[in-house]
Amino acid sequence: MTRVAVGDIGTNTARLLVADVEGSDVVEVEVRTEVVGLGRGLHGTGQLQPDAIERAVSALGSFSNAFADADLSIIVATSASRDAVNREAFFDEVERACGVRPTLISGDDEARYSFEGASQAVPDRRITVIDIGGGSTEFVTGRSGVEASVSVDVGSVRLTDLYLGVGPVSAEKLASARSVTKTLFGGVSVQDAEAVVGVAGTCTTVAGTLLGLSSHDRSTVHLSTISLEGVEELLGMLATLPTEAIAGVGTIGIKRAPVIVGGLVILEAALRTVGASAMVVSERDLLHGVAVGLVSG
């Protein structure tokens, strides 16, 4: 097997997967997630902010030993980096900190990797994968491979920055965010699937919280089911709370608390868009898809 280290710098999180890979088999060795908020302040300025860059570089730098020790290493960069005019300066800092220069991937590639990761968890079924990030949301349908995909420029950080702000969220702001998200998803056409699978931080955090966990447990969350009704109830409750109170609910925590209402608005709209009353949540996602692709070349 080949030892790989895959980093992912998204709009809200910096993540690491260390795994042994052979063919499509991925055996996890280490998984780490740091909420860094790289995209906070980006959507009004077009630039990654100095404090956000510092947080992201620090997190990725803490992964440097894993990158150095692996047979193959890569860092993929997604929505925030796609949008930022100072992307290359940020990549320079990351490369100095951990020895690996981020690789910018498109929304279509992000969708494909997320599907490939999720399909490892739900094999031999025709699935629609919903990947809610900080800056974009991907919908991907297929069985043995991607048959249709679309990436929409709305994510938990982007929606929060532009429409919601800090909690508690007024009824007017919540209605506006819901309306905008519904409009953005209006052009999404999803083919029939046997299951809907949710990946990434919003989905896994919501799942853990709805399961009654007080700290995140990947093994409990993986392949659990969350309902549209549960999402709506949690959204209604959290929207009324200040950020500090949201942080104490379930598995949310202080770093994800500022953007979880935005994530829930998107999750609610995404489930309605695909006509699903429930979804399976997978801890296998983009990282796992990238790991397989890195080895296969």
Image (cartoon, rainbow, N blue to C red):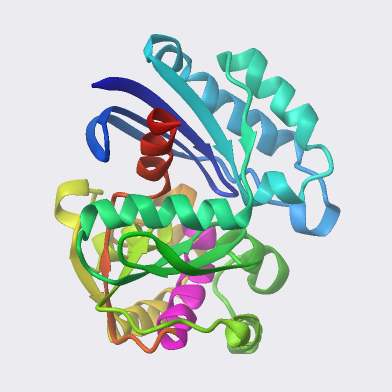
User: Image quadrant of residue 166?
Assistant: bottom right
Left or right relative to 75: residue 70: left
Q: Is residue 39 left or right of residue 130?
A: right
Q: Using the rendered image of the protein, determine whether residue 178 is visible from the camera's viewpoint.
A: no
Q: Nearer the viewer, residue 142 or 44?
A: 142
Instruction: Tell me if residue 231 comes above or below residue 10 in the rendering.
Output: below
Res 141 → quadrant: bottom left
Residue 117, horizontal then vertical, whole percent = 34, 50
Residues 225 and 252: in front is 225
Q: Up-down: is 223 above or below 77?
A: below
Quarter location, residue 211: bottom left
Q: Which residue: 30% across, 49% down? A: 284
Q: Give the residue drawn at x 66%, y 62%.
A: 158
Query: Is residue 61 highlighted in magenta?
Result: no
Kindly identify the residue that appears in the image at 55 percent across and 51 percent down: 109
Where does the image place residue 70, in percent across and percent down from the top left? Answer: 38, 15
Q: In the image, what residue occupies the spot 40% across and 25% down?
A: 5
- Residue 67 pos. (x, y %): 45, 17
**Screen quadrant of the N terminus:** top left
Q: Would residue 215 be visible to someone looking at this image? A: yes
Q: Is residue 19 left or right of residue 69?
A: left
- Residue 259 on the magenta span: yes
What's drawn in magenta, residue-wise? 257-273
Q: Main secondary structure of the magenta part?
A: helix
Q: Nearer the viewer, residue 125 or 207?
A: 125
